[in-house]
């Protein structure tokens, strides 16, 4: 009951914080961390201990899955080279830099310093996605930040497992070929498991028409991907990410409008609840961890700031050369793009979950030296990035000049709507020429689409339409869906515009009623 009470309190606090954050136009994750930290400092508040397996198994799979589903595979193809370099090269560079600095300034044993470097080497997809929803970044910049956070997470967790193996080996020799083989097995095996599961789920969802059953399948999929991959001794994170990307690409073909709307609503609630609880826990954990530090580690705040600065510096050095491949740099080095990509690289839930899963003892049974300090430094760096970078990210984006103006996004959406309505009107005229539909239904559809093109439609005709008219409207919506995906595949609209218009078409189709 104690744990349930804390979770309920966090949900209530998160609801209030989210409302407050929306009015102030500041990211909710940053405020949630501060609120959690403030609550933990109140005298009499009990210490909070969250088992790492709870975070890894209960919280991470759905959040990772939603982030992966939101990833634009079309834009990913255009930036896969810089994403690959960042997901591998930057992870190793960050782990090495943090490991050396940690060993020098914190007094951690070299093996534990390397563990700390592996924990902090990647950005966090949960935090990045939560912060990125508020920003109007160009498509390639947005997908670069989001894709890197998804794929470097898998790399860093694989590296973390290798580092833990070294730390608990109590002096045993470590084989680099064996470590490299484990890296390939964990990452590659997780990708295979995720791809196979995505294929099986796709086959099942194509044959399911019950909205409740479809929702259950969608909620179970990320957990199945994680558990199956971990059971096969591969990377559960990689499996969830791969499954999410593949299923997100084909979601419009797997389900109808009613089910898509229901899934969108259900996942919106699930994501809000999980993000609210987990970001609050990040703040709540720090005071408890600090109390468990041994004597002689009072310099941890300065050490955490030094590690955060190292992470930012290494990130700038790595991202600047890669800006040539990302619009709007136009093939030149761009400090603006590098600055935004660097500042968007916040740490979050994943490093905390990894740090909490560090074993208490080495293989010989002795306590693992440096574990409490690693936990405190990890949590401190996470809080620093979520608060400092999170609260200032919008300002950095605005000063960079990369943010898309509201007029630009509104004009793109308006042009796309016009294209969809013209495609629908062309289909109506084609059916009129074939004389396969009642003239009254054709005339109603024609007038409705023409009125929308003239910006004077009231949108009320669907609720009172007869069977013939509803049939015609469904055909028109199918044509508009085809036109929408043509505009997207030909790079005429952004992924954000596609998702917004797809949601509008789904709502319109659902309003027609019937199967």
Image: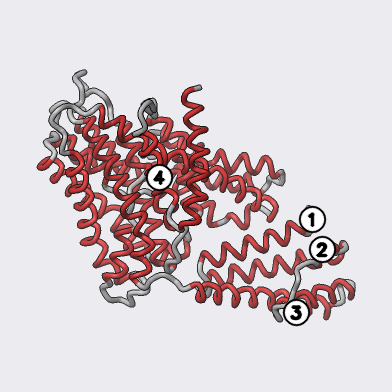
Snapshot quadrant of residue 177: top left
Snapshot quadrant of residue 416: bottom right
At horizontal 72% and vertical 62% (from top left) the residue drawn is: 508
- Observer-nearest of 244 and 275: 275
Q: Secondary structure at mark 4?
A: helix
How dense is the environment of label 2, judged by Cα within 10 Å: few (below 14), some, or many (20 and up)? many
Q: Is residue 390 above or below residue 354?
A: below
Residue 283 percent location from the top left of the image: 36, 39
The residue to which callout 2 is attached is: 470
Is the Cβ of the residue at disc 2 closer than 8 Å to that at disc 1? yes
- Observer-nearest of 134 and 447: 134
How dense is the environment of label 3, judged by Cα within 10 Å: few (below 14), some, or many (20 and up)? some
Distance between the Cα atoms at labels 4 and 1?
39 Å
* Residue 513 badge: 1
103 sits left or right of 32 in the view: left
Is the Cβ of the residue at disc 4 closer than 8 Å to that at disc 1? no
Distance between the Cα atoms at labels 1 and 3?
23 Å
The residue to which callout 4 is attached is: 238
Distance between the Cα atoms at labels 3 and 4?
48 Å
Going from N to C along the chain, the mark reached first, 3 or 2, is 3
The residue to which callout 3 is attached is: 450
Q: Residue furthest front?
A: 43
34 sits left or right of 461 in the view: left
């Amino acid at each position: 009951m104690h744990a349930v009470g804390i979770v309920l309190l966090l949900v209530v606090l998160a609801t209030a914080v989210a409302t407050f954050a929306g009015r102030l136009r500041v990211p909710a994750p940053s405020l949630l961390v501060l609120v959690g930290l403030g609550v933990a400092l109140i005298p009499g508040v009990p210490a909070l201990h969250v088992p790492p397996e709870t975070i890894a198994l209960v919280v991470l799979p759905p959040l990772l899955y939603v982030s992966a589903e939101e990833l634009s595979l079309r834009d990913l193809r255009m930036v896969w080279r810089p994403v690959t370099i960042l997901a591998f090269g930057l992870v190793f560079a960050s782990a090495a830099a943090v490991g050396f600095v940690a060993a020098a300034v914190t007094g951690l044993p070299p093996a534990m310093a390397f563990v700390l470097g592996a924990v902090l080497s990647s950005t966090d997809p949960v935090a990045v996605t939560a912060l990125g929803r508020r920003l109007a970044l160009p498509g390639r910049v947005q997908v670069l930040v989001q894709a890197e956070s998804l794929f470097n997470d898998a790399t860093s967790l694989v590296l973390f497992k290798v580092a833990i193996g070294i730390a608990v080996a109590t002096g045993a020799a470590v084989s680099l070929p064996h470590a490299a083989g484990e890296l390939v097995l964990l990452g590659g095996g997780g990708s295979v498991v995720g791809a196979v599961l995505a294929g099986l789920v796709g086959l099942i969802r194509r044959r399911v028409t019950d909205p409740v059953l479809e929702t259950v399948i969608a909620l179970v999929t990320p957990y199945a991907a994680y558990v199956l991959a971990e059971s096969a001794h591969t990377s559960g994170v990689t499996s969830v990410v791969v499954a999410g990307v593949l299923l997100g690409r084909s979601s419009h073909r797997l389900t109808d409008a009613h089910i898509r709307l229901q899934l969108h609503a259900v996942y919106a609630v699930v994501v809000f609840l999980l993000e609210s609880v987990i970001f609050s826990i990040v703040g709540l954990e720090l005071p408890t961890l600090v109390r468990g530090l041994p004597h002689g580690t009072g310099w941890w705040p300065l050490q955490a700031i030094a590690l955060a600065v190292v992470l930012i510096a290494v990130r700038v050095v790595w991202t600047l050369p890669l800006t040539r491949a990302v619009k709007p740099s136009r093939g030149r080095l761009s400090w603006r793009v590098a600055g935004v990509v660097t500042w968007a690289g916040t740490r979050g839930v994943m490093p905390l979950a990894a740090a909490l899963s560090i074993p208490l003892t080495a293989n010989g049974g002795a306590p693992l030296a440096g574990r409490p300090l690693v936990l405190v430094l990890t949590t401190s760096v996470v809080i620093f990035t979520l608060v400092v970078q999170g609260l200032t990210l919008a300002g950095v984006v605005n000063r960079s000049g990369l943010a898309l103006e509201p007029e630009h996004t509104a004009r793109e959406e308006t042009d796309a709507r016009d294209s969809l309505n013209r495609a629908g009107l062309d289909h109506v005229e084609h059916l009129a020429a074939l004389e396969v539909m009642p003239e009254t239904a054709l005339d109603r559809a024609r007038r409705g689409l023409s009125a929308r093109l003239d910006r004077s439609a009231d949108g009320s005709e669907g609720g009172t339409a007869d069977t013939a008219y509803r049939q015609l409207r469904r055909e028109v919506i199918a044509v508009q869906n085809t036109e929408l995906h043509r505009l997207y595949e030909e790079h005429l609209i952004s992924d954000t515009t596609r998702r917004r218009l797809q949601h509008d078409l789904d709502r319109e189709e659902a309003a027609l009623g019937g199967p």
